[in-house]
Image (cartoon, rainbow, N blue to C red):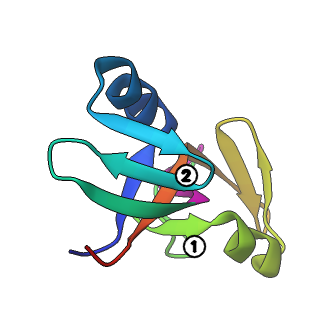
Amino acid sequence: MSRLFISVERLDSWTAEGRATLEGDRMTLTELNRAFVMRPAVHFVRATGQDHDPNDLIGRVKSKEALDEMGADQFESSVIYNDTAYDIIDGFIGEPLPP
């Protein structure tokens, strides 16, 4: 199974519905009995106020560690990188654990 991006909103919904459980940095999908290590991340949706993406980030997922290494700044649902503001979806990268 590949790693996956899960938005905070979706994760909240899954846990409320009993479809997932969280314990520390581990999420388990209850129906599949599959566990994932969760790392904070963002999904880049669009460059704010621009018709193009000068940094080729739209559609990409970056961990919070990667944002720090890039020198990008996150504030709520936005990231500023190289003088470009991006709308993002806050969430997690789930790395599958062996069954």
The percent position of residue 99, horizontal first and vertical second, equals 25, 73
In the picture as drawn, the residue positioned furthest to the left comes out as 31
Specify the label residue 86 is tagged with.
none
The percent position of residue 57, horizontal first and vertical second, equals 51, 69
Q: CA distance from mark 1 to mark 2?
A: 9 Å
**Magenta stretch contains residue 47:** yes
Specify the label residue 54 is tagged with.
1
Horizontally, is 88 left or right of 29 in the view?
A: right
Instruction: Tell me if mark 1 has few (under 14), some (14-19) or many (20+) residues whose alpha carbon lies within 10 angstroms of its own.
Output: few
Check the image and report above or below for 33 versus 21.
below
Secondary structure of residue under mark 2: loop
Secondary structure of residue under mark 1: loop
State the residue at coordinates (37%, 73%).
97
Quarter of the image for the N terminus: give it.
Answer: bottom left
The percent position of residue 70, horizontal first and vertical second, equals 76, 79
Instruction: Tell me if mark 2 has few (under 14), some (14-19) or many (20+) residues whose alpha carbon lies within 10 angstroms of its own.
Output: few
The percent position of residue 31, horizontal first and vertical second, equals 15, 42
The kind of secondary structure the magenta stretch mainly shows is strand
Q: Determine contact: label 1, label 2, CB under 8 Å.
A: yes
Q: Which residues, given as a range, are shown in magenta?
A: 39-49
Check the image and report above or below for 30 versus 66.
above
Check the image and report above or below for 39 versus 92.
below
In which quarter of the view is residue 54 placed? Answer: bottom right
| Residue on which the image places disc 2 | 50
Type of residue at label 1? Pro
Residue closer to the observer: 66 or 92: 92
Type of residue at label 2? Gln
In which quarter of the view is residue 21 placed? Answer: top left
State the residue at coordinates (63%, 49%).
24
**Magenta stretch contains residue 80:** no
